[in-house]
DNA sequence: ATTTTTTTAGGTCTTTCTACCGAAGTTAGC
DNA sequence: GCTAACTTCGGTAGAAAGACCTAAAAAAAT
């Protein structure tokens, strides 16, 4: 009896690669492969009785991102396992995934053997997170004991967004109907909260958090 | 007679995928696959007589990025064709690649068929750039007629890199053994060249061009 | 209901940035 | 060889940013 898999990745070529790796194994039957998470969500809705064992998914996808897709999957089909294969290894993302009950995470620069091991482990009911991911996660958790999660308030996000959009303090003050002193306070607090030295640091943070587009 | 290929990509899994795609074709013989561009550079130096037809490479790689690798390849081995397979589709990057005589560019979300077509086309001595790439390129070139290609000098790149790394003018001056006036001149010229207003704009540009890491 | 956080704003002072100016030696392109 | 671009440095001056401080009303959390 073969396991039934579904693969989602918007990089078609990667999808092809994964497919040929899995097809060369005898245990797996790839039911469906798609470059769009929303297809999968619809498929699950239409075919509730289909026996699916594992869904392998990327994180960044155009229509429906991997995290949301995972949420949708797990909401209605707790028995379906999910494995994320991605090139992003931010702590925030890993946090997000763990909270959403993902069963495993393997970076795209992992070896083929590791991927297969991850699939096997997960199908046996265990979790699989690759060493790199665990390291990043732990290291960050340990070093951030005091810092805790740096959370910006709504107003702070507004200000840092405008700063990263190259507006001057006065312009930001005008736009938000604030005193320029207030905006300066925000900038100061932002820098100290985020532990950066100047606008360059704030801009990088805004980009990382996707407050502005690249 | 098979064609000899070399593949470079730091995403091991993608590499495996590419390999299995190419191995399923009969015309190609993958001599070497590596996740590090510098290996390839060394290999070419050690084996100057090896007959290599095509090198397929990613752009963003840890040790030696695709653009630099391409430059090294083309400097000593004009007969070797190069195909870039990447997920980045910025105009600047495409510009860079064309200037460095890359023979083709296919995005990672392309179909397997397109990849094979690209390889065939290039091996026949023509260039192959996928439609998406050509579109992005043309659209941007047309809208940027006046801007022209903004080229930064080596020194300018050094300065903008340090600016984006949150160093102050004085610190940059000290590091580069320049007067702070000089550094200020550079910053001013950079802003006017790149048409940005301040450090935030410079930082975003530095990130886009990957002068610094995210 | 009380405490904490957020939002707002002011002052002072130093440093840095940005905008102008000019200029000279070096390198590279034509 | 000439010209253009690059690299370097200087001055002046004003705007903005960044380092300190305090503080109070509003909102959120406990």
Image (cartoon, coloured by chain):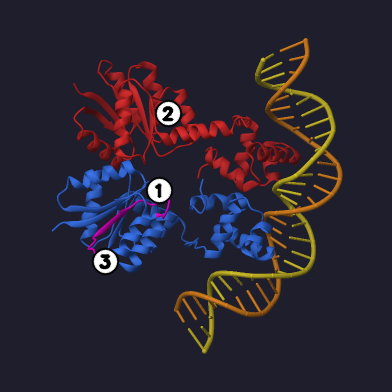
Chain colours: A red, B blue, C orange, D yellow
Q: CA distance from mark 2 to mark 1?
A: 22 Å
In the picture provided, is A31 more to the left or to the right than A181? Answer: left
Q: Which residue sits furthest left?
A: B1
- Examine the rendered structure and indicate whether residue A179 appears above or below residue B140: above
Q: Nearer the viewer, mark 1 or mark 3?
A: 3
**Residue under circle 3?**
B79
The disc placed on residue A137 is: none
Quadrant position of residue C9: top right
Quadrant position of residue A211: top right
Residue drawn 40% across the image and 53% down it: B139
For disc 3, the neighbor class at 10 Å (few under 14, some 14 to 19, many from 20) is few
**Residue under circle 1?**
B88
Q: Nearer the viewer, residue B157 or B32?
A: B32
Q: Per the image, is B192 magenta?
A: no
Q: Nearer the viewer, mark 3 or mark 2?
A: 3
Q: Which residues are magenta?
A: B49-65
SS of the residue under disc 1:
loop
């Amino acid at each position: 009896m073969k396991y039934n898999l579904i693969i989602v990745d918007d990089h078609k070529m990667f999808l092809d690669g994964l497919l040929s790796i899995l097809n060369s194994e005898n245990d797996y039957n790839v039911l469906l492969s798609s470059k769009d998470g929303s297809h999968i969500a619809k498929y699950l809705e239409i075919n509730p009785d289909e026996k699916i064992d594992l869904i392998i998914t990327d994180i960044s996808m155009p229509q429906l991102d991997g995290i949301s897709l995972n949420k949708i999957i797990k909401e209605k089909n707790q028995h379906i396992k999910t494995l994320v294969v991605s090139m992003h290894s931010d702590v925030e993302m890993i946090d997000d995934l763990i909270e959403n009950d993902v069963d495993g995470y393997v970076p795209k620069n992992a070896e083929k053997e590791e991927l297969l091991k991850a699939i096997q482990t997960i199908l046996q009911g265990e979790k699989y997170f690759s060493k790199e991911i665990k390291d990043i996660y732990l290291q960050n958790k340990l070093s951030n004991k005091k810092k805790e999660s740096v959370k910006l308030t709504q107003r702070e996000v507004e200000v840092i967004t405008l700063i990263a959009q190259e507006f001057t303090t006065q312009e930001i003050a005008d736009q938000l109907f604030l005193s320029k002193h207030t905006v300066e306070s925000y900038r100061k607090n932002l820098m100290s909260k985020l532990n950066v030295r100047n606008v360059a640091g704030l801009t990088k943070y805004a980009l990382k958090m996707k407050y502005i587009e690249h």
